[in-house]
Image (cartoon, rainbow, N blue to C red):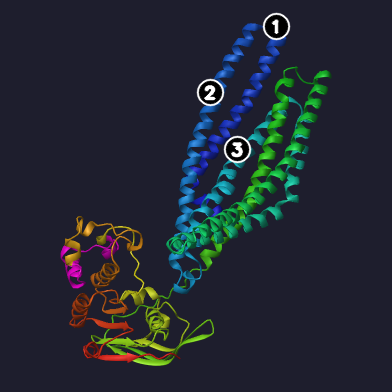
Amino acid sequence: MDYYLKKQKFLCIIVCVFQALSFTMNACIQFLLMKIFDSAAQMNFNLVLFWCCIDIFGWGLYLLFSVLADRIQAKAIWALNNDVRKNIYDSILRQNYKQYHKNDIGEYLSWVTNDIKQIEQLAWIPFFSGVGRVTQVIVSIISLAFLHWSLVLFALLSAFLMWSIPNLFHKKIEKLGKNCSQEQSVAISQLKDLFLGMDTLKTFGRGEKFLGKSESISDNIERPNYILNATKANTEGIVGFVNVTLQVVSMLLIVLLVMQGKVMLGVLASGTNLIGGVSNGLSGISNTRLSLIAARPYFEKLSNLNTDGEHKSNKILSTFKKKISVTNVSFNYREKTVLKNISFVFEKGKKYALIGPSGCGKSTFLKILLGWLPDYTGNIYFDDTDIRIVAPEQIQQQIGYVDQNVFLFNTTIRENITLGGRFTEEQIKKAVKDSALEYDISSMPNGMDTIVGENGNKISGGQKQRIAIARALIYNRSILLIDEGTSALDEKNAERIEKCLLENPRLTLILVSHHLTEARKRQFDEVYKLDTP
């Protein structure tokens, strides 16, 4: 939490300054109220009128400072929330393939939506409120010191009681805050799964399952929130009762001092407000402490994210020159053998096909080459460099990859091909031509600026695959891995794309296929076969 506050320290300091001015002005108003009361006791209407005018001016300043504090606080919270999100994004980006896929997408969405909102409600808003309350307590105590020392003593006793009571509950509230974060992450994941399966449920007439399950998930989201808020409310109720009791006792103390002639009669009008400023301020600080305790698990999660990021090697992978050597590579997934003692050689500029039955590990092997799955045995060398000692980003700068499950962003065809990279129109047109997309794009009203929809749901499966291939081609990697990248294409377009790839002398191609005709096999320099271990 401190890290983010320091990052936005300028805005935070301005908020604190206006909070301090606001509560200082409020204390001044209490003194003005005493003056009005004393003037009324003296039957001096002109003096009452004078102090009332000053009082109105004081209230104007108080409201001005309060409005400025609230507006700048809103700006500060905006900046703080964005800083937290950026930290989450950076942490996710640093994760390797295995770390990233350990969590469900719904959980990541929960981090940057629900968790941020909880941090705002449990940390940022209470923090700024707490700063104001601290100022309120200090100013009120100083004001009481000008009236009588016994009022200060009573205020300090109130401070001790109001500070001590929340300590009885903070462990329970911290535990409930952690549980709230965990339960809501699970619920968001389940909701995502439910929405993705909507078409399947409707197809089989199981719409009622969506309603029943969504209601159950909704309860799972709200239940931990309710328990946390109910526990906080109970605690705040106890604190509030003690606060009211102290205010009544403070009023009795002031009456006693007035009767003894130790303070002016006007103190009766505002003295209780000043003591109330101490007790209410401390009550607010106590509530702030409870909220910050409940927020602690969210910041611990952020801290764990930062430590779980990928450790990146500084080793530079030289430009691919000769060959990739794969020697006795084995890979297990959850105690199941996926690859066992495979050995291949892929020479620069040559074209390779990788075939085998479903489940034999073809896709897994490509992910190992990409550096995504480092927990294999055996050796893989890019020329003379062991890929274990280089960061996956170094490998991916030389390897293009077309997944069998193509993902497209909900934006234009152009953006999906370039991914925001800078390319000339000639480069884009060549990638479109070589991926057999020309005719499709020319028939679309918006051409390259056609929106493809969520994960490409507005275009065909074949068009999605060709966009993915164009994406791989435009980045001009020296090695291209294609995992069933032409499976959704008609024979004519598949042959056209493969011809373009096979005739590129600078490209080292490794193409995974379940079905490869004898005629197509002859087009490759080597066809490697994987068997189920």
How far across and down, in percent of the image, does residue 419 sit? 30, 63
Q: Counting residues from the N terminus, which is met first, the one under dot 3 or under dot 1?
A: 1
For label 3, the crowd category at 10 Å Cα-Cα, with few meaning under 14, some 14 to 19 and many 20 or more, is many
Read off the residue under disc 3. Answer: 132
Depth check, front residue: 202 or 309? 202
Q: Secondary structure under badge 2? A: helix
Q: Which quadrant would residue 521 be assigned to in this image? A: bottom left
Read off the residue under disc 1. Answer: 43
- The residue range painted magenta reads 415-437
CA distance for labels 3 and 1? 37 Å
Q: Is residue 504 above or below residue 178?
A: below
Q: Amino acid at mark 3?
A: Gly
Q: Secondary structure under badge 1? A: loop
Q: Is residue 68 above or below residue 198?
A: above
Q: Amino acid at mark 1?
A: Met
- Check residue 423 for magenta coloring: yes
Q: Amino acid at mark 2?
A: Gly
CA distance for labels 1 and 2? 27 Å
Q: Secondary structure under badge 3? A: helix
What secondary structure do most residues of the magenta stretch adopt? helix
Q: Which quadrant would residue 316 be assigned to in this image? A: bottom left
Read off the residue under disc 2. Answer: 60
